[in-house]
Image (cartoon, rainbow, N blue to C red):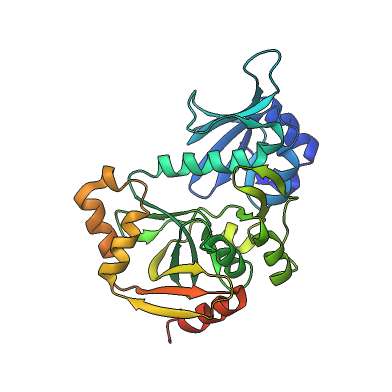
C-alpha cells in the first residue's frame, strides 16, 4: 500500500476513490476508509486534510469503514445525505448541502466510540511546552473559538472536540482534525488569525452556520506525540464582561470534568480514579471573559510552566 499526503492527490483522484473502493485516510492512531457519492466531500478533504497521509487502494485493517451517501425516504421526498458506520448511525440524515458537517460529526462519533477503553471528555485540548490544556465547555462558552485561536498561533492542536485520556498512563491521545467554528466565531477567527484557512460556511444547520479551519501541519505531523494534562480551564464567554478568573481545586475540576465525560458510566470507579490521577498535577481555573484577545493573553501568561 502506497500512501502520500492528501495534497498530492488531485480532487478528481479523491472523488474517484470516494465513489469507488474508498479513500483511506490516516488520522493519527486511527485509520478511516470513506466512501461517498457526494460531490461536496472531495474538495473539503483536499483543503482540510491536505497534510494527512492517505491512499487510493484500500487494504488492511480500518478502525472505521464509513459511507456518506445520498438517500431519500420516498420518490417525492428530497434527497438527503446519510452517515453510516458498519450499517449503523447515531446521526439522522441531513440535507445534501450539510454533507461535510455530517462527515465531521460522524467521525467524532466514531472516534469517541472506538476510544471507549480510555476516558473520553467532550472538550477541546491543546498543548504547549509538553503540557496539555483541557478546555471543557457547554455550547456558547467559546471553547472552540478559543481552541482555534490558540491552535492557529502558539499552541499545538490535539483535538477541538474530544479529549482522550489513556487509562494506562494518563496522557492525552491526540486526534487533531479540522476545527469547527460556528456563527460569529467564523468572522472572529478570520480577524484574529488572518492566515487561517477556512471552508465556506454551511448555513442553516441545526447549529447555525458552520465552517472548519484547517489544522496546522505541525499538529498533524505530531499526532502520535501524547502529553500529560498540565492545565484544565473552564472558559465562559459573557458578552462585554471583563476577564475574571478563579483557581479551582482539583476536586472541583474533577467533578466538572466528570459531567463532560462521555463514557463515565462504562468506566465506573476505575475511570474516575484514572481521571483523578491524570489531573493530579494540573492547575485548574474557571475563566469568564468578554473578548477573545483578553482570554488568549491570559492563557499565554498564566498557563506556562514558569507561571
| 251 over 2 or under it: above or below | below
> What residue occupies the far top of the structure in this picture?
75
| 8 over 86 or under it: above or below | below
Say which residue appears at 25% left-offset and 68% top-offset. Answer: 251
Quarter location, residue 105:
top right
Q: Is residue 59 visible?
A: no
| 270 over 246 or under it: above or below | above
Q: Where does residue 99 sit, x and y in percent of width and height?
A: 66, 36
Q: Is residue 233 visible?
A: yes
Q: Where does residue 306 sit, x and y in percent of width and height?
A: 43, 87
Classify residue 161 as left or right of residue 285.
right
Say which residue appears at 47% left-offset and 68% top-offset. Answer: 235
Classify residue 82 as left or right of residue 243.
right
Screen quadrant of the C terminus:
bottom left
Number of numbered discs visible in the structure rendering? 0
Q: Where does residue 211 sit, x and y in percent of width and height?
A: 68, 52
Decide which of 183, 21 is in the foreground and name it: 183
> What residue occupies the far bottom of the structure in this picture?
306
Decide which of 235, 130 is in the foreground and name it: 235
Say which residue appears at 63% left-offset and 50% top-offset. Answer: 52
Q: Where does residue 14 sit, x and y in percent of width and height?
A: 73, 36
Decide which of 265, 33 is in the foreground and name it: 265
Say which residue appears at 73% left-offset and 38% top-offset. Answer: 42
| 27 over 252 or under it: above or below | above
Screen quadrant of the N terminus:
top right
> What residue occupies the far left of the structure in this picture?
269
Amino acid at each position: 500500500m502506497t500512501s502520500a499526503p492528501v495534497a498530492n492527490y488531485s480532487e478528481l483522484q479523491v472523488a474517484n476513490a470516494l465513489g469507488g473502493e474508498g479513500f483511506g485516510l490516516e488520522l493519527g492512531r486511527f485509520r478511516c476508509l470513506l466512501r461517498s457519492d457526494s460531490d461536496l466531500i472531495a474538495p473539503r478533504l483536499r483543503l482540510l486534510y491536505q497534510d494527512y497521509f492517505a491512499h487510493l487502494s484500500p487494504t488492511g485493517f480500518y478502525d472505521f469503514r464509513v459511507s456518506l451517501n445520498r438517500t431519500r425516504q420516498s420518490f417525492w421526498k428530497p434527497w438527503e445525505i446519510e452517515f453510516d458506520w458498519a450499517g449503523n448511525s447515531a446521526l439522522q440524515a441531513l440535507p445534501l448541502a450539510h454533507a461535510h458537517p455530517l462527515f465531521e460529526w460522524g467521525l467524532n462519533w466514531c472516534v469517541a466510540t472506538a476510544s471507549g477503553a480510555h476516558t473520553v471528555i467532550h472538550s477541546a485540548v491543546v498543548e504547549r511546552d509538553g503540557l496539555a490544556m483541557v478546555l471543557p465547555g457547554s455550547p456558547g462558552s467559546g471553547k472552540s473559538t478559543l481552541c482555534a485561536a490558540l491552535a492557529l498561533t502558539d499552541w499545538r492542536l490535539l483535538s477541538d472536540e474530544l479529549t482522550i485520556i489513556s487509562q494506562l498512563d494518563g496522557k492525552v491521545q491526540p486526534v487533531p482534525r479540522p476545527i469547527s467554528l460556528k456563527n460569529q466565531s467564523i468572522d472572529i477567527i478570520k480577524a484574529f488569525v488572518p492566515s487561517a484557512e477556512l471552508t465556506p460556511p454551511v448555513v442553516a444547520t441545526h447549529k447555525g452556520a458552520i465552517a472548519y479551519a484547517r489544522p496546522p501541519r505541525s499538529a498533524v505531523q505530531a499526532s502520535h506525540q501524547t502529553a500529560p494534562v498540565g492545565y484544565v480551564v473552564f472558559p465562559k464567554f459573557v458578552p462585554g464582561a471583563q476577564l475574571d478568573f478563579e483557581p479551582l481545586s482539583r476536586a472541583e475540576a474533577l467533578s466538572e470534568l466528570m459531567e463532560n465525560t462521555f463514557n463515565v458510566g462504562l468506566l465506573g470507579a476505575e475511570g474516575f480514579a484514572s481521571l483523578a490521577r491524570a489531573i493530579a498535577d494540573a492547575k485548574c481555573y474557571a475563566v469568564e471573559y468578554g473578548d477573545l484577545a483578553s482570554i488568549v493573553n491570559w492563557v499565554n501568561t498564566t498557563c506556562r510552566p514558569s507561571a
